[in-house]
Image (cartoon, grey):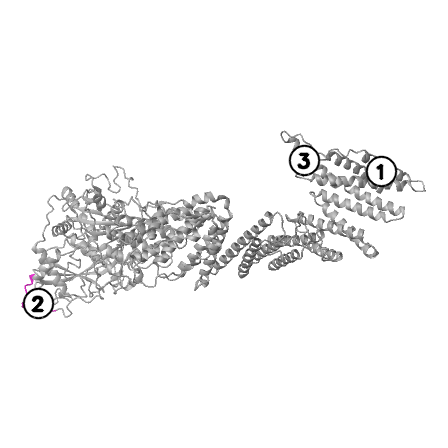
Amino acid sequence: MSTEEDGTHCPVSTVHGNEDVVECGDDNRQDALICLGNEIKSRAVVKYSAAPPPATYALLQEKTDLKLPPANWLRESAQLGAAGTTVLGSSSKNKPFSSFGMAYDFIDSIGNDVDVVSDSENIKKLLKIPYSKSHVSMAVHRVGRTLLLDDLDIQELFMRSSQSQSSGCELQTGDWTWLKEFYQRLVDQKWQRKKKSKEHWYQKAILSKFLYYSINGDGSVEPVPSDSGNPDEGEEECRDEEFGPSWPATFTSSPPESDTPKEDDVSMENKFALGHVASVPKEQNLPTLFNEGENSQGLRNDFVRNILWTFEDIHMLVGSNMPIFGGGRYPAVSLRLRDNNKPINILTGIDYWLDNLMCNVPELVMCFHVNGIVQKYEMIKTEDIPDLENSTFSTKVVKDIAQNILSFLKSNCTREGHTYWLFKASGSDIVKLYDLTTLCEEATEEKCQNPFTLPVAVLLYKVASNMMMKKSQNRKHYGTIRTLLLNCVKLLDQERHPQIIASANYMLSELFQLDARAEEEGGDSLRAGGSEDSYSEEEDEDEELPEDSDDNGATPPRDSKAVAVIKSVGELSVPEKYTATHQIRPNYTFPVSHDKEERCRHVLSYVLKGLKAVDSSIKKESDLPAADPNTPIPLKYEEGNPSTGPGAVEEEIAPLLDRVGPCQEDLKHPTRSGMIPGSWQYRMKLQLVLKASKAYYVLSDAATNLLKYGRALRYIKLALQCHDAYCSVGTSLRPEVLLFHSQCLSLCGDIQLMLAQNASNRAAYLEEYSYQTKEDQEILHSLHRECSCQAFNLVTDLSMDAEYQLFVSCKCYEAAYELLTSGDLKEHSPEQLGQLLKRLGNIRNEMGVFYMNQAAALQTEKEEKRSVSVAEQEMWKKSFSCFEKGVKDFEAIADGANTALLLCNTGRLMRICAQGHCAVSAHLSRGEFSPEEALYYNKAIDYYLRAMKSLSSRESHPVVWDSVNWELSTTYFTLATLQQDYAPLSRKAQEQIEREVTEAMMKSLKYCDLQTESARQPLYQYRAATIHHRLASMYHSCFRNQVGDEHQRKQHRSLAELHYCKAVRLFLSLTDAPCELLRTQLERVAFAEFQMSGQNSNTAKLKTLSGALEIMVQTRHAFQLIHQELLQEQSEQADAPGSTETVTASDGSASSGVNTQEVLKLVGVFEPSISFLLLHLVKLLSAGKRKPSVKEEDSVKLYKQVYSKLLRADKSAPLLHRVALCLELLDQLALHVEGSES
């Protein structure tokens, strides 16, 4: 472990299967030092080890003959692992996919944490490029910031390709003829494979035997018995291995016998092999992909240990098979065999040093031999290796080489999913980088194949899947995930790999959060594209460096096919010669849209691609109906037809809930399209169909919010068709699916209700409903492979009948309610249950109002009304039933306000019933107030009182309270008015009727809220004034007609005067009731005149008449208001073009401000009444025996003048003139009255 102070390093224990870093103490810090000073920082962490704890190596005796094989030679050894027949533990087999095996096992590190994933041999080969004349050939792949490096033996590749062609079988390598021609043209025209020398195989065998000798516990020589065969057979076996099969078999081969998990801190669910992608948490709802048995040979992680090696600032995941032994001063050493006659060169020194650094081995044990005879051992510390004689090298230079190579590759390997080829010819100083994927695409051959395509695609998929699984994953990384998946899909052929394509498209659809608000999706962070290590789907290929740039060596190469060229390997030793100019760009952004429809369209496009991939993989198509994806599927709508009313469809709509239970109990039978339950096609199609259903639901909800109800109905129809297909395929429905289904039905009910309420736009809605996109058609055709999708047609058809739409809406809500109250859903969705009950109450209120209005329309259509029709009674019953059910719904959720509103509507229904029982004679005149009317009005009052009780107080819901209060007051007022105007004298006595009228009037007055300031306050004032006026008129009439009982007459007189005064006071506070005020004052004058007629004393009469004249003078306010209204009306008529009419006495039309007919009548009453008063006042003042005072004389004189003007007034003059005259005379009298009072 490195420290910041002195750069010291501690050994790492290699306990099997554990990641373990051992801290070193002060006493052994110098012993743990691997590199000198602060020159190099190196830290190695063993992520996985299949080897047992290091055992002490056997120190061979001097003169041991290594040419003789030990008894255990080539036998499986836990200590050596796979290294028994290899040189220093590196496999002789070409492993072109070794980095992918490690990447699959440590998927969390790919794309973010690690710069390089590779075999340790490849790392060493790269870092030795400036020192070695050997050729270098490696495949490079990029995933995020991670580069995967694999040895690419081109010559062996050509040989395998030609062998497969000659044998007539197409192996995994594919046809690389195009690359062979390219290689011959640019690199090696002969490309003859150089065979290894006999000396090579001799040295290889010697090393192998040495390692087997070293693991013998007693260290003695145990040669193989002489009859075991020729020792050269082992060498031949090694030689055969060199040319043995090295490319992986097909990706559908049988699984290996054992597949040991590689990372302890990662659960089994997070293990990724080619054949198995782990299940994703339920939050992401991702499908389980690939069968367990599809793990592919050749893509396994076969290394004895996987090490996370940090070399300076470079993080590498390295695979190593180097045997590590115990012994010496350190717990771990590496063994090397050297010919004593050959000095150690710089390449060997770098090799030894890097191996020990990567495996964190602090010491090297060197065994020297001469012609296979052991001579001596030598112990060398790792930090001393760079200073060995004849192999001295600078660790700083090696560090610079590593940083330059990494920068060069990161700058030029920019396209994710592409296979790059890093090549240096033997003896050449030029290193070239080719894009094999682009070369393959440019080749004219039809069979151009890249064997890396599938491993790369699967790795991209698994990295994306791993990122999706992380619950804490910030959505700013969605752009990265989308890039990975799009590149994955781009690499694969749908016919060969439909499963990966379908799953990738499903995950792409999952990136778009349908249930989240746009502002909650972290729009800013998504647009920012995440950290600087985010990368773009398309890497801006047009962006190139200037031709004279030397920063990254990407000057235009002579080889036009090369992406980039290192002109001389010597440049790699220059510090920071190459810099990563091509950062993994932050410019890629996830397509964030605040428009729900756009997000859903993205989802549906990916769902469709996934469905196509699934459908293409299903072989059974003979039983399917032929369907053209380009032919629209008709969406039916219903005309207003009596046969489609609620009664006709009651039985048809009953099976609405048939789709909520298990649809198929037998899991063995294939679906209609041929899918086998439990197969990947089966699971994937269920997920895709459900996702499509949710997308259509969101589209429908968005269209509803935009008031596009035709479009909304089309989308909810598609959502329910998807659900129908889901039920046809699925064997059972999970609670969350049932919950979503209830939401769909609820939304469908909302839409049908809105369509019923907006009947005027039906033509536009029909046009929206009939439109269909090509994408929707193709999704429907995929659904029709599983079922006819007709189960929900009745509730999603566009009807032209409002009653039918309300009925369907109610049925949708009822079906959704039954879903929510069944099974476990009650506990899952209490909030949604409350919302649904509110919707049920609302739709039943709407239906009740609809039938109530129908009944009211039937009443107005009847010319002569003798009895209630059957149709009316039917409407009353339907309306009452709906209101009653709605009240129960709202009471179930303790919604007092809506309960009060429904009870209020029920009260209104009772009033309509009362109006229906109104008796009308043959002459169309109103008959007496009937007992049926009284019954229904009292029922209405009961419902209004219940509504008030449900609210308890005005503070809870002021608006509803005021509404119920007004209706209750109105009902009492109507009841009293009808009893007063059409008194049932044939059934009741006059006194009883008067008592009932008084009682009803006073109750109506009780609910007239005169104190609260509101829009209804003037109405309350007008009603209260009207009530007082009516009561005053009634007591006035009783006073006139009462004979005998003087006490009662006095009581009636005082009550009449009281109510007249209150009525006048209230009418005076109103500006729009001058006629009512005038009428009330004239009645008061008439009441005074009647009192005068019963008086005998002139003094009493004079007093009464004077009081009446004062009342008459008070009518001046009413005349002023009337005069203003008439003047305004006259000016409006004068301004109207072509109109010269004036308001005349014969004009009976009612203007907008005042009723001229009513004014004419009142003026006709006013003029004789005031004339009567003036005449009698003059007579009484003149008839006295005593001499009248000056004041009285002035009064008589004025009264005569006014009386004279009234007599001379033209009764045929225009109304405006007559009103003006009355106002003028009242002004004169008012001045006199005010003067006399003062």
Which residue type carries mark 2? Val
User: Residue 231 in the image: x percent, y percent?
Assistant: 7, 63
- As helix, strand or loop, the secondary structure at mark 2 comes to loop
Coordinates of residue 22 in the picture (x, y in percent): 28, 63
Q: Which residue, given by chain and number where applicable, does mark 2 sit on? A: 224
Mark closest to the chain's N terminus, 3 or 1: 3
Disc with the residue nearer the chain's start (3 vs 2): 2
Q: Where does label 1 land, which residue?
A: 1199
Q: Main secondary structure of the magenta part?
A: loop
Q: Please report the residue visible at 80 percent of the width from the left and 36 percent of the height from the top.
A: 1225
Residue beneath disc 3: 1129
Residue 973 in view here: yes
Residue 189 is a magenta residue: no
Q: From the viewer's perspective, is 606 left or right of 428?
A: right
Q: Amino acid at mark 1?
A: Tyr
Q: Residue at x 20, y 60 (%)?
A: 321
1049 or 87, which lies in front?
1049
Measure the alpha-carbon separation of dots 3 and 1: 33 Å
Q: Name the foreground residue: 219 vs 122.
A: 122
Q: Which residues are magenta?
A: 220-232
Q: How many marks?
A: 3
User: Which amino acid lies under the numbered mark 3 shown in the image of this protein?
Assistant: Glu
